[in-house]
Image (cartoon, rainbow, N blue to C red):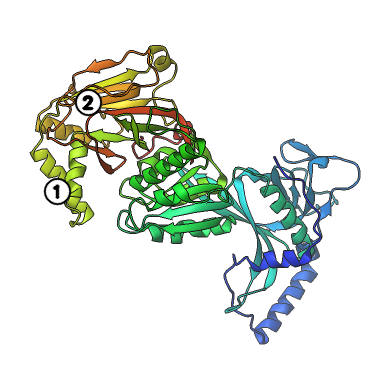
Amino acid sequence: MFESPRKSTNRHAWSESQEELRETQPVSPLKTGSRGRKKKRKQHKQHQQHPQRQQRSNRSVSIPRLRTGKPSALTLGKGAAFNAEDAIVKGIFEIEKKSCDVVLTATRVIWTPIEPETPTGESGSWRREEHVELRNVFAVKVKRRRSVGQQWGGTLLGLTLFCCVRKGAKLKERPMHLNNLSADHCEVWFRHLKDLLSGFQDRPKSLMVFVNPTSHRKEAYQTYRDEVAPLFKLADIKADVTVTKRRGHALAILREGQLDAYDGVVCVGGDGSVAEVAHALLLRAQMDAGRDTDSIFTPVRAALPLGVIPAGSTDIVACSVHGISHPVTAAMHIIMGHRQAVDVSSFSSQGRLIRFGFSCMFGFGGRTLALAEKHRWMPPSQRLEFAVIRTLANLKPEDCELSFLSVKQDQETTKEPKGLDNGSMSVIAVRNASRSEFIKHLKRYGNLNNQFGFPFVETHTARAVRLRPRSRGDWAEDVSEKAADFDSKNIPIISSEVSYPWNIDGDLLEVPGELLIRVHPQLILLFGVNTEEVDDGPAKCGCI
């Protein structure tokens, strides 16, 4: 997994790598005069009174100790031991104002405080050992002190490791400072650490980033610039940023562009933007694989993973793979290379693929979006509120036929129908209900507890669904499981007009008749984790 450490031979490259780093804040130049002379006299007096303290501070600039000779066992705290043969390099650094013996192995940085000797000449019998796992480290930088206005160079202070730490559902970066004034010492450690960190192959080094500037309150680009871009730069990730100019802009680029140079694609926006980019990646994969999208086909997985930076009015996809709508957490999942395979549905009509997506709504959800799209001249929040009230005022039953391929009973009992990667979808059907009852259902929809506890709401777990308005003809297509039996229910859902608008991931699609929806297990990789495996309490947002 890790590349072998290489011996440093290019000092010019080391100098260049230092010049790229500006972690420390500039400091004012030191003043000279009577106060400086008094300080020197005070330090000289302290040296005479405590010579051991001066000896201890001098040790912080010692040169690194490379692995040589026969292996020996070192005991580090509470009897934990590692073989000295595992050490790649050893040395002394000041960590949190304490001089420490520090050891670098292939998987850890281990440090132990250096305790002063007792009057009998013996050191402390027990020293507390601490460590950080390299799998939680995403960058190593050179630390320098610079004067006000100084842009380059500066006094070398040591190295800084940047670690990914979890605080509740959030991830954030935390620096760990290894202070040492020796350039040779820091150079050896810097190069070994860079070699080891480069061995994490799942971590991206080049990303294609799409930013939707109109998402939410038009704050998506600012979110990326202020919160995400600095972290990508810190992790040495090259980002090719495109600020989309219109709907379908990202789709056009991903369908025709060269993707070989990238390790992933990142979308900064809401669920609508994420759905467009996911659809584009999957459509590109089918084109590259020679799939016929004008038929009922088995799709192939997208070639590149997708990262989601939440910056929209709805961020359900981000919540589902991060457990929280938090841009820094999303960025850290991308930097660390955390990946989660998720299911994606295909939406087909009359034997032709319409699009790939995560969720859809027919009836009230589709009618509301269609009305909102006709009033785009209104501000987004007012437009949505107007559309919801108007659609509720005209609430009517939708006459349609709903059929679905249920998950088998043995599958449903062995694995709960939850999460993003179980090969099934949740079907929520609302029967004919009064306006007041339906409003109660809408109010409870955002609550994770007892969302669907009404007698007029049905929930099912299915692998395929097809919906046909009664006024249309017979089904023109079939699902791949030809021998499977579909459960048909005459379920009036909501509101009846001539057209049939669908809300698919926040996008309005007019479908002329029946629609076939099939779920495809683990069809795309998202940067994130399975939030159900993280025991930090329930997520504060709904799931797909």
Residue at 28% over, 15% down: 487
Q: Relative to the observer, which residue lies in front, 347 or 360? A: 347
- Indicate the amino acid at tag 1: Phe
Question: In the figure, 45 relative to 199: above or below?
Answer: below
Q: Percent position (x, y) of residue 159?
A: 68, 60
- Indicate the amino acid at tag 2: Arg
Q: CA distance from mark 1 to mark 2?
A: 28 Å
| Residue corresponding to mark 2 | 468
Asked if one can make out residue 129 in the rendered structure from this viewpoint, the answer is no
Image quadrant where residue 221 sits: bottom left
Q: Relative to the observer, which residue lies in front, 124 or 174? A: 174
Could you tell me if the residues under marks 1 and 2 are in contact, i.e. CB atoms within 8 Å? Answer: no
Left/right of residue 105 with respect to residue 345 in the rendered view: right
Mark 2, other Cα within 10 Å: few <14 / some 14–19 / many ≥20: many
Q: Percent position (x, y) of residue 120?
A: 85, 51
**Quadrant including the N terminus:** top right
Image quadrant where residue 496 sits: top left
Image quadrant where residue 501 sits: top left
Residue at 44% over, 19% down: 415
Does dot 2 land on a helix, a strand or a loop?
strand
Does dot 1 land on a helix, a strand or a loop?
helix
Q: Percent position (x, y) of residue 383?
A: 18, 51
Q: Percent position (x, y) of residue 480?
A: 40, 21
Residue at 38% over, 41% down: 317
| Residue corresponding to mark 1 | 386
Left/right of residue 13 with respect to residue 375 in the rendered view: right
Mark 1 vs mark 2: which is more N-terminal? 1
Asked if one can make out residue 291 in the rendered structure from this viewpoint, the answer is yes
Q: Relative to the observer, which residue lies in front, 448 or 516? A: 516
Question: In the figure, 188 relative to 43: above or below?
Answer: above
**Quadrant including the C terminus:** top left
